[in-house]
Every structure is written in C-alpha cells, then in structure tokens.
Amino acid sequence: RADVALAMINKLYGIERDLKDVTDDQRFAGRQAQSLPVLTQLKSWLEKTLPQVTAQSALGKAVHYLGNNWSRLERYIEAGFLPIDNNAAERAIKPFVIGRKAWLFSDTPKGAAASAQLYSLIETAKANGQEPYAWLRHVLERLPLAESVEDFEALLPWNGRAS
C-alpha cells in the first residue's frame, strides 16, 4: 500500500523538477493544474488507508504522520515561490548541528556564541550565492569604513558581490 503513496509523492517531485526553471506565477499555475489533482488523490488514499492501519506499524506511523502534517504538505501549492519541502533549510542548518558537538567543548560561552555567529554568517553568504571566504574578507576590509546605514546594507551578502 505504501507504494501507491510513494508513487504519488514521486510524481509531485517530478512536477516540481519540471517547474524548476519557470517564474513563480508559472509555477503556481503548473501546481494548480498538475500537483493539485495528485494531492487530491493522495488525500483520498490517506483517508481510505488511515482507518485500515494500526498506529504502531511502520505504515501506520507514516500514514499518521502524513495525516497530522497534511496542512503543511499542501501549503506549497498556495504560491509559486514556496518550496515543496524544507530540504534547503535542513542543508543550511547542518553545519550548526555538526558544530553543536564542537561547541560543547568551547572554552567559554562567548567562544561558543562566536562560533555560532560565524556559522550563521557563512551559511547566509552561501545561501546568497557568495563564496564565504571572499565575502567575509570583503566585509571585514570595508566594515571599518562604513558610516551610514546604506554603507552597512551594501555589505550584506544579498546586496552584491564580494570583489
């Protein structure tokens, strides 16, 4: 029975791959035309399957999880700019999860905070298409010269390229 749901979920991801390089408006329209019917089928499968499985079985746990999170799953079809999943966010925080172990052994709370802040700067740079070392060097060279709000904003990773 799980194969049916997995096939539909696979189809949803296939639709997303096909819509990857279009505008948000086009993605929204594509989702309404292609993804919404698949989600409707998946919801029907879920409602049919939910009472037929025990909550303790592997399928039951998966089905109950899907049922409990249904509103979160279908949210992405409400707008073209919303991602189908949070994988990008998961990848972005992975260094923090790995860093947590290192922070346990930081000499001081301030040292741990500094490490966390540095991770945040690096991941923000990556998320905005910057090479972290080049961007940090660019910012740290220009930061002492910044005097206005505009000067500081120009250093943000989404406001230009490090030179």
Image: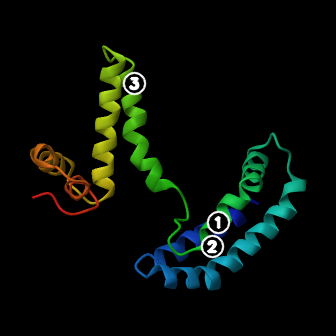
Give the numbered dot on residue 130: none
Q: Earlier in the sequence, mark 3 or mark 1?
A: 1
Task: Give me the residue at 75% from left, 74% from top.
Answer: 40
Estimate the spatial distance between the alpha carbons at disc 3 and disc 1, rounded to whole Å. Answer: 34 Å
In the rendered structure, are the residues bearing label 1 and label 2 in contact, judged by CB atoms less than 8 Å apart?
A: yes
Which amino acid type is shown beneath numbered disc 2?
Glu
User: What's the mark number on residue 75?
Assistant: 1
Three-letter residue code for mark 3: Lys
Where the C terminus falls, by quadrant?
bottom left
Is residue 94 depicted above or below 127 in this figure?
above
Of labels 2 and 3, earlier in sequence is 2
In the rendered structure, are the residues bearing label 2 and label 3 in contact, judged by CB atoms less than 8 Å apart? no
Q: Secondary structure at mark 3?
A: helix
* Closest to the observer, 49 or 94: 94
Identify the residue shown where x is 36% and y is 39%.
95
Q: Position of residue 158 (x, y in %)?
A: 29, 60
Find disc 2 in the rendering and name its residue. 78
Within-10-Å neighbours for mark 3: few <14, some 14–19, many 20+: few
> Which residue is pictured at 89% across the width and 55% down the height?
52
> How many numbered discs sit on the rendered protein?
3
Residue located beneath label 3 in the image: 101
Q: Position of residue 65 (x, y in %)?
A: 73, 49
Residue 2 visible? The answer is: no
